[in-house]
Image (spheres, rainbow, N blue to C red):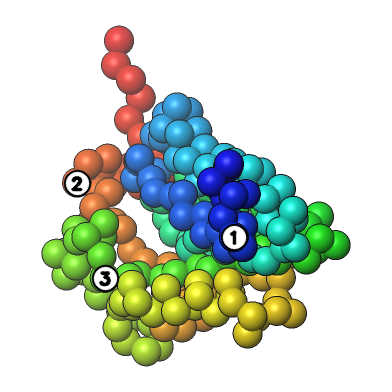
């Protein structure tokens, strides 16, 4: 904080990239702690970034905060319920922050990436059925590249987007026009068919 205020131009651009998921599975077998941890890292992590960065931006005349959400905020991703809720929470947090901070010339937006070719999703690229469920629902027919997401973030952080705030912009090759991916090949071997349809086996004993 002190370093931000001491810099010649102060803090002007902030990217909130909290995210991830500690759990994949049907809601009916998801533990409360697992659900809470995933929502917390996404929503609370982004909240804390905005909470502590905004005063510095205001003191230096405003600028931009960009949060990283996901198309899972708007398109159902079965077996990633906590992650989807966490990302939807980021979208609403961005709207509220943009509304509150607009009078101080601080813009707040989010980007919603689809499938991006990174190490974090190597398992998807190594599982043909899951990868195909992404690509067949993506009009442009391919995964995104990290540089493409970075370019949108830079646009939202820069002066070209001076009249854009409170928005969650999808960058997904058109995937959000259709339906979410099919994670059944990941979830079914672990939880079984009954759990995936909402009827997990009753505990014995």
| Distance between the alpha carbons at the discs numbered 2 and 3 | 25 Å
* Residue that appears at 71% across and 58% down: 60
Q: SS at mark 2? A: helix
Q: Nearer the viewer, mark 1 or mark 3?
A: 1
Q: Which residue is mark 3?
A: 117
Q: Is residue 64 left or right of residue 18?
A: right
The label number, if any, that marks residue 189 in the structure image: 2
x, y percentage for residue 86? 53, 48
Looking at the image, is 111 positioned above or below residue 79? below
Residue closer to the observer: 140 or 15: 15
Q: SS at mark 3? A: loop
* Residue that appears at 58% across and 41% down: 2
Residue at the farthest right position: 103
* Residue that appears at 54% across and 79% down: 155
x, y percentage for residue 82? 48, 44
Q: Which residue is mark 1?
A: 8
Q: Is residue 95 left or right of residue 130?
A: right
Q: Is residue 36 left or right of residue 141?
A: right
x, y percentage for residue 204? 29, 16
Q: Quadrant of the N terminus?
A: top right
Which class describes the residues within 10 Å of circle 3: few (<14), some (14-19), or many (20+)? some
**Of callouts 1 and 2, the N-terminal one:** 1
Q: Are marks 1 and 3 in contact (CB under 8 Å)?
A: no
* Residue that appears at 59% across and 77% down: 158
Q: Are marks 2 and 3 in contact (CB under 8 Å)?
A: no
Q: Nearer the viewer, mark 2 or mark 3?
A: 3
């Amino acid at each position: 904080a002190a370093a931000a205020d001491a810099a010649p131009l102060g803090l002007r651009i902030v990217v909130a990239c909290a995210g991830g998921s500690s759990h994949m599975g049907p809601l009916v077998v998801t533990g409360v702690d697992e659900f809470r941890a995933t929502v917390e890292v996404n929503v609370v992590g982004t909240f804390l970034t905005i909470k502590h960065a905004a005063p510095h931006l205001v003191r230096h005349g405003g600028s931009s905060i960009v949060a990283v959400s996901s198309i899972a905020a708007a398109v159902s991703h079965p077996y990633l319920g906590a992650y989807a809720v966490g990302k939807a929470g980021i979208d609403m947090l961005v709207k509220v922050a943009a509304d509150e901070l607009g009078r101080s010339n601080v813009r707040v937006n989010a980007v919603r990436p689809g499938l991006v070719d990174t190490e974090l999703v190597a398992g998807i690229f190594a599982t043909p059925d899951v990868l195909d469920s992404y690509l067949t629902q993506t009009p442009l027919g391919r995964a995104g590249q990290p540089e493409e997401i970075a370019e949108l973030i830079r646009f939202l952080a820069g002066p070209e987007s001076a009249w854009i705030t409170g928005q969650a912009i999808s960058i997904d090759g058109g995937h959000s026009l259709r339906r979410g991916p099919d994670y059944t090949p990941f979830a079914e071997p672990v939880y079984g068919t009954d759990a995936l349809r909402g009827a997990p086996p009753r505990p014995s004993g």
